[in-house]
Image (tube, helix red, strand yellow):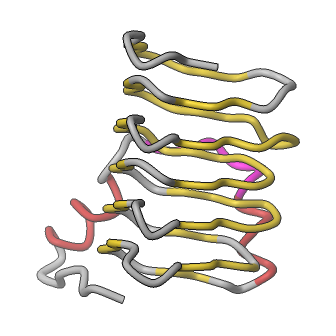
């Protein structure tokens, strides 16, 4: 658990579930485990995990090997790749969702810096639209 008064900058990786109540900037890679962002959690990072549940605020791309859940208190700005995505009533989301099961194999690749995909799209003259 990363408590409400903890702030981390850099790469978070490991082999157990993680609950984030504080602030994390960088990348989070727990491919075989669950990442939960609590209501007080603020994440500015790309997240890759087996299951991802978001109750707080996330800015960055999300790769869920199994599923991604954004609760009614969740706020996500970034792209989601997962075979199953749940957006609860009241959830805030801006980005794209790719539910192609083959897309979950992206979980084996290295994540880029947050917003790199959005920057590339904007540079090409396109703009992300709300889902």
x and y percent of residue 57 in the render?
A: 35, 49
Give the position of the C terminus as an image quadrant: bottom left
Residue 82 appears in which quarter of the rendering?
Answer: bottom right
Residue 2 in the image: above or below residue 26 = above
Residue 103 appears in which quarter of the rendering?
Answer: bottom right
Q: Is residue 113 left or right of residue 97?
A: left
Report the residue at 39% width, 40% height from top. Answer: 113
Report the residue at 37% width, 61% height from top. Answer: 76
x and y percent of residue 96 in the render?
A: 42, 80
- Seen from the viewer's position, the closer of residues 33 and 10 is 33
Residue 45 in the image: above or below residue 97 = above
Report the residue at 79% width, 32% height from top. Answer: 17
Q: Which residues are magenta?
A: 107-112
x and y percent of residue 128 in the render?
A: 24, 80
- Seen from the viewer's position, the closer of residues 64 and 125 is 64
Give the position of the N terminus as an image quadrant: top right
Q: Is residue 21 left or right of residue 47?
A: left
Q: Is residue 23 magenta?
A: no
x and y percent of residue 69 in the render?
A: 62, 67
Main secondary structure found in the magenta portion: loop
Q: Is residue 104 left or right of residue 73?
A: right
- Total marks in image: 0
């Amino acid at each position: 658990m990363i408590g409400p008064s903890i702030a981390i900058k850099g790469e978070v990786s490991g082999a157990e579930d993680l609950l984030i109540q504080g602030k994390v900037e960088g990348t989070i890679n727990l491919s075989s485990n669950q990442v939960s962002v609590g209501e007080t959690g603020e994440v500015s990072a790309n997240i890759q995990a087996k299951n991802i549940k978001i109750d707080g605020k996330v800015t960055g791309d999300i790769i869920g090997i199994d599923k991604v859940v954004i609760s009614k208190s969740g706020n996500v700005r970034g792209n989601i790749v997962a075979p199953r995505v749940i957006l609860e009533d009241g959830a805030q989301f801006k980005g794209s969702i790719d539910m192609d099961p083959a897309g979950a194999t992206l979980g084996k690749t290295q994540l880029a810096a947050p917003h790199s995909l959005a920057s590339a799209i904007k540079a090409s003259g396109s703009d992300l639209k709300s889902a």
